[in-house]
Amino acid sequence: MESIVELVKTLINPESIINYGGLTLLLLIIFAETGLFFGFFLPGDSLLFIAGLVCATSEEARKVGEAGIFNVSIYVLVFSVMTAAILGDFVGYWFGRRTGPVLFKRDDTFLFKKKYVHMASDFYEKHGATALILGRFIPIIRTFAPIIAGVVRIDFNRFVLYNVIGAVVWSSSMILAGYFLGRSFPQVKDYLEFIVIGIILISVIPVVVTFLKQKIAGKSA
């Protein structure tokens, strides 16, 4: 049981993912968070930002003969994350097409909450297909938006376009923001925990607002 708890702690801690799993585990996390309905609890924004930051500080360390934490080229990092995010959404879309309305009737479990499906569905109805781009920047929505796109059977060519655009914009912006911060202020690596907390707090604001709106709308109805 303790080993399972430790594994969960590692999977939700961006710094631990990079330190212990490197690029391989990072890509698996991004794929799962964007393609598997039970991946909603995994870090996305904070993981990519920290990956870019650590990539930059590792480059600076190697320049002075020290060992870097994350010895991956920024180009390889960005391209591989884009690919994992795109493939994840394809899996989510396929899952949505296969399950259809059954997903809305599924009972809640430890790894699945029906309210998240309804939240993503409302977000999709409000923003249309562009939810696949906008939703990339919002936890939970990022996981369920491609699934909802599959449920409503959006035209596949449109899905491919929005999927690619969303993956490119999201992954490059998150990673490069951290990368250039790390290059400008290498000492910032000593404050990773505070940065992670800040990113998480900022990223969950849209989720909280959406949830509260649903609660208010439900009470009004």
Image (cartoon, helix red, strand yellow):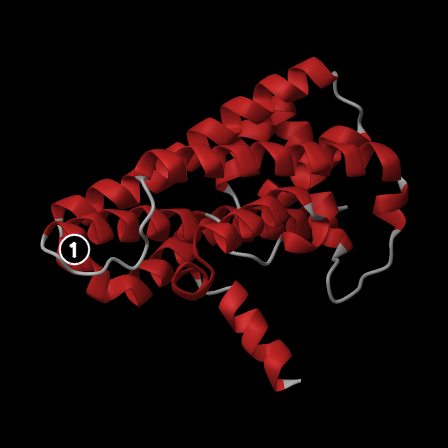
Can residue 135 be seen in the rendering of this structure?
Answer: no
Residue at label 1? 61
* Residue drawn at x 42%, y 60% as measured from the top left: 14
Horizontal side of residue 184 vs 176, given as left or right: left
116 shown above or below 17 = above
Q: Is residue 105 left or right of residue 160?
A: right
Q: Nearer the viewer, residue 100 or 202?
A: 100
Pick out the residue farthest to the left: 64
Please rate how many residues cluster around mark 1, counting C-alpha atoms within 10 Å: few if below 14, some from 14 to 19, many from 20: some
Residue drawn where x is 73% and y is 32% of the image: 93
Q: Quadrant of residue 156?
A: top right
Look at the picture and state if 38 lies above or below 178: below
Res. 102 image quadrant: top right
Picture coordinates of residue 82, whole percent (x, y): 49, 33
- Rendering coords of residue 132 (x, y %): 59, 29
Front position in the image: 136 or 181:
181
Q: Secondary structure at mark 1?
A: helix
